[in-house]
Image: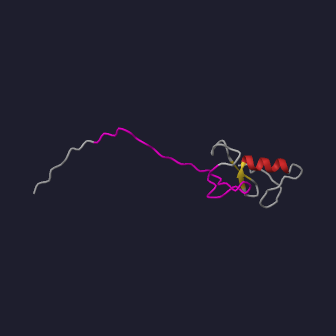
Amino acid sequence: MEEKKSNLIVTIKKWHTVSSWTWGAGDDNCGICQMPLDGCAPECQFPGDDCPIVWGKCGHKFHLVCINTWIQRNINEPTCPMCREPWEFRDD
């Protein structure tokens, strides 16, 4: 029995792509607002550059807007809300 080869031509008319991003913070939640770090804080409209994540030298991470609000409320002695170490932003 002889096989026939088909010369089927496929034309792609539309292409839909899907992508996702992450801050590389794992599946953690912000220790202040309890929202996912890959999401956004209640004060923000959109995740991503509008609601970045910051790490402290102590290793804890928060939405920038959340830790800034925390620091403003504790201006005399800003500490990490999780471990109560003096709050300092990580340099790298």
Going by the picture, which residue comes out furthest to the right?
Answer: 76
Q: Quadrant of residue 58?
A: bottom right
In the image, taking residue 43 as reference, residue 23 lies left or right, namely left
Residue occupying image coordinates x 23% and y 44%: 8
Q: How is the image coloured?
A: secondary structure
Q: Residue at position x 45%, y 44% from top?
A: 17
Residue 70 % position (x, y): 80, 51
**Dominant SS type (magenta):** loop
> Would residue 73 appear left or right of 31 to someone viewing this image?
right
Q: Residue drawn 74% across and 49% down? A: 66
For residue 14, above or below residue 39: above
Q: Estimate the x, y position of residue 38 in percent, counting from the top left.
A: 62, 51
Most extreme residue toward the bottom is 83
85 or 72: nearer the eye? 72
**Which residue is found at the position 30% from the left and 39% from the top?**
11
Question: What is the magenta range?
Answer: 10-39
Residue 70 in magenta stretch: no
Q: Is residue 36 magenta?
A: yes
Q: Nearer the viewer, residue 4 or 47?
A: 47
Q: Most extreme residue toward the left, as rendered? A: 1
* Residue 30 screen position, x and y as percent: 70, 55
